[in-house]
Image: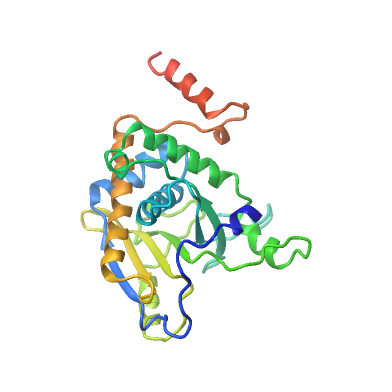
Amino acid sequence: MAAVVAVPPALPAACPEKDNYLTAGYLSVLLDGETTQMLVGEVPAAFHTGIHDILLIAFALAWAEFLGVGDAPIGIDVEGHGRQEELGADVDLSRTVGWFTTKYPVALAVGGLDWAQVRAGEPALGAVIKNAKEQLRALPDPLSYGVLRYLNPEVDLGGPDPVIGFNYLGRVGATVGDVSAEGWRICPDGWAVTAAVAAIPLPLAHTVELNAGTVETDTGPRLHAGWKWASSVLNQDQANRLSQLWFDALTGICAHVRRGGGGLTPSDIAARLSQLQIDELQQHYANR
């Protein structure tokens, strides 16, 4: 975790004196329904992970292309609702409301690809996704990060949080069948509360922040992306490009899965096998 915290910031920090919710730039966009449908089902299943990891990896891919950092890791401040965590065997969350917010840094190295390879969903993209998935799996339990950083005097994790923020809110307006395994869902009116915050000159927590969620529409689920950024660092055109890069990465991942991409990674199995060994075994038994 110390190596993650030590990753240099990818952007200048927001200026507290002039970067706030009133002066920030905002962008709200929707991904097409066909791509969203794959992202909430087929794609996570193909890579044996959750949609959160897929969206986060695509987010890192977009930043790697936007910044031109190559193989250098990108620090991202990740927020989650925390309710999926196992707090204890005798803890029952079914009669509770609200979030048990988790906030923790990750550092993802996803470079080495030409952007045309990402957009086309070429085989090399699958290797990058698997590697990034293993980077995430190697991190400590996110629920323990706050305790580790602020309450453990023997651990020094000082320094600023990453200036790039990512938060996937889950599915909004889901039907009963789409409610999470914990038996809860986000209220459709919940995002209206965050819009009201924009009228208050509070300092920005991040230079750039993405709050995403899957919203139910008359034609099916659509991935919604709400971008917020410090106007002293990014302009509208740059934010538009970054948003399009994220959608391009997600579309490329879906194209990769349509061609049969995906597969297991070392953390999925008990045997101590490398990624190369797993890939060779899967290829050997693919048609048997």
Q: Residue at x 28, y 60 (%)?
A: 241
Question: Could you say which is closer to the camera, residue 212 or residue 154?
Answer: 154
Q: Is residue 65 visible?
A: yes
Please state the horizontal and vertical placement of residue 16, each as a whole percent of the image: 48, 82
Question: Could you say which is closer to the camera, residue 54 or residue 207?
Answer: 207
Q: Quadrant of residue 135?
A: top right
Q: How is the image coloured?
A: rainbow
Please state the horizontal and vertical placement of residue 150, each as a whole percent of the image: 69, 68
Please state the horizontal and vertical placement of residue 123, each as a whole percent of the image: 35, 31
Query: Exactly how many numbered labels are in the figure?
Result: 0
Q: Is 280 above or below relative to 217?
A: above
- Classify residue 215 as left or right of residue 19: left
Question: Could you say which is closer to the camera, residue 248 or residue 260?
Answer: 248
Question: Could you say which is closer to the camera, residue 271 or residue 106?
Answer: 106
Q: Is 159 above or below relative to 23?
A: above
Farthest-out residue, right: 154
Q: Residue at x 41, y 66 (%)?
A: 209
Q: Residue at x 38, y 15 (%)?
A: 287
Q: Residue at x 39, y 64 (%)?
A: 210
- Classify residue 282 as left or right of residue 8: left
Farthest-out residue, left: 219
Q: Is 192 above or below relative to 273?
A: below
